[in-house]
Each structure stands twice: as C-alpha cells, then as structure tokens.
Image (cartoon, rainbow, N blue to C red):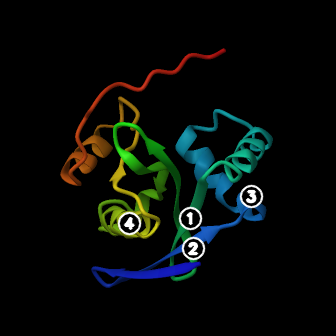
Amino acid sequence: MTIFAEKKGMNLAFNKILKEEIPQILPMIQELMGHQFSNEILTQRFSEMFDQNYECFGIFHEGKPVGVFGMWFMTRHYAGRSCEPDHIFIKESYRSKGVGKKLFEFIYEYAIKKGCETSELNSYVSNYRSHKFYLNEGYEIKGYHFLKKL
C-alpha cells in the first residue's frame, strides 16, 4: 500500500512495510533506540509484533527512506477503538520541514478508516521536542507510562 502526500513542495509516500521487509527498517530503528538491541533481537520482536494488531510504514521521499513508524490497533475501555502511533522516526535532515505534520494527517485518516475513535501514544520523558509537537497536535497528557523488567 502506498499513499502519497504533498507538503511544502515535498512529495512523500507512506509505504506499508511487510514482515519480510523488516531488515530495511532496522537502521532507522537502531538510530531511534540508540543501538540498545541487536538486529537479531529487533527482528524477532518486530516479527512477533506483526502478528499482534500492529502495522508498520516507511516514509519515503523521492524513493528514499526518510522515516519509519508503526501503529497499534486496540479497543480500550476508556477510549474505544484506538490507534497508537509507535516508534516514530524521521531522519534529522527531514525534521522541522512539515514531514511530522503530514505523517500525523496520514495516521489520523488511516485510523479513522479502520474505525478508530481515538489516538494515544507514549513519548520518552526526555524527548521535549516531541512533547511540544504532540501538544500542538491536540494530544493531552493523561498519565505516566510505567515499565518493569521481569
């Protein structure tokens, strides 16, 4: 699936990434995650994710990958059918050029087509630039995300 969008003269394509294409997104995921995990671990985790109401898309400009993001789909008792954008990464040279705005327009349209009523997401506490962006997009801070290693 390829969806095209134009923003400030920049033609973008949002291409659905298939399970067998996981290796092509790993360099961007590694950069996003600070190389915390091996490619083998990430490949195994993404392979499982593809079987759990998860979809992945690449962001392309003139055929070149410039970003990646995922979306989880679920029903929440407090929010109804919901889409959760995840692991959003846009290459540094494409930031602050309207790519994020166009990306979220795509996410909202896609989620509505899939019957979603809401969108929610997590953002690292130290990622201040994303907080400002998400607040400008109309997201509200509703709580904290807790994680415990087992």
Mark 3: which secondary structure? Answer: helix
Q: CA distance from mark 4 to mark 3?
A: 29 Å
Question: Which of labels 4 and 3 is toward the front?
Answer: 4
Q: Which residue is mark 2?
A: 15
* Callouts 2 and 1 close, C-beta under 8 Å: yes
The residue positioned 57% from the left and 37% from the top of the image is 34
Question: Which of labels 4 and 1 is toward the front?
Answer: 4
Q: Which residue is mark 3?
A: 23
Which tag, 4 or 2, sits closer to the chain's start?
2
Q: CA distance from mark 2 to mark 3?
A: 15 Å
From what the image shows, is residue 123 above or below residue 43?
A: above
Mark 2: which secondary structure? Answer: strand
Q: Which residue is mark 4?
A: 112
The residue positioned 73% from the left and 64% from the top of the image is 21
From what the image shows, is residue 22 above or below residue 122?
A: below
* Callouts 4 and 1 close, C-beta under 8 Å: no
In this orientation, which residue lies closer to the viewer: 47 or 28? 47
Point out residue 108 in the picture as x, y percentages from the top left corner.
Answer: 35, 64
Q: Which residue is mark 1?
A: 57
Question: Which of labels 2 and 3 is toward the front?
Answer: 2
